[in-house]
Image (cartoon, rainbow, N blue to C red):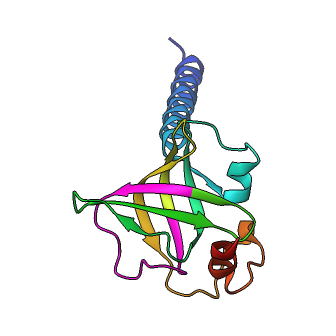
Amino acid sequence: MKAKHQRLILALVALVGVAGAGVLAASALRDEAAYFRTPVEIQDGKATVGEAMRLGGMVAAGSIKRQSDGLTIRFVATDGKASVPVEYMGIVPDLFGEESGMVADGRMRADGTFVADRILAKHDERYMPPQMGEMPKGVAKAQQKT
């Protein structure tokens, strides 16, 4: 076999290897990708049942209910325009509380409840992700009155 043919075969093998690695990386990232959703987007039907996503918002005042098993917690996430019931089984972060910001990873259930696998409490209430826009202070209090 000529040296020219050997280089061509080597280049093709390298190209196939790089393409294969790209396909594997894309497949792994697709399984880990989670869209960020707000309660308004969920209310508008942009989230499907079983889709992995992140829900961001504020914990509505007076909405935290701890279940008798000691691990399950139910609360309402709000963005001032819409609310979504959330259920989580586990230990919540120390900063988690009513009228505080939170982000939850999980999936929507058919009954409209967001089932969280992980909850993150926001450290600074002044920070809001760009997708949430400008959420006025006291949103959780206003949501509680309606």
Q: Position of residue 87 (x, y in %)?
A: 43, 54
Q: Is residue 96 left or right of 12 when viewed as pictured?
A: left
**Would you place residue 98 above or below residue 20 in this image?**
below
Name, please, the residue furthest toward the front. Answer: 145
Q: Position of residue 11 (x, y in %)?
A: 57, 28
Q: Residue at position x 68%, y 50% from top?
A: 42
Q: Residue at position x 52%, y 35% from top?
A: 27
Residue 59 seen in the current view: yes
Q: Nearer the viewer, residue 7 or 85?
A: 85
Residue 38 seen in the current view: no
Q: Residue at position x 51%, y 26% from top?
A: 10
**Would you place residue 68 above or below residue 79 in this image?**
above
**Would you place residue 74 above or below residue 146 in this image?**
above
Q: Position of residue 146 (x, y in %)?
A: 71, 70
Magenta run includes residue 127: no
Q: Residue at position x 72%, y 69% from top?
A: 132
Name, please, the residue furthest toward the top. Answer: 1
**Magenta region, residue range:** 85-103
In the picture, residue 39 is in which quadrant? bottom right
Q: Is residue 66 left or right of 76 when viewed as pictured?
A: left
Q: Position of residue 55 (x, y in %)?
A: 58, 59
Q: Nearer the viewer, residue 20 or 81?
A: 81
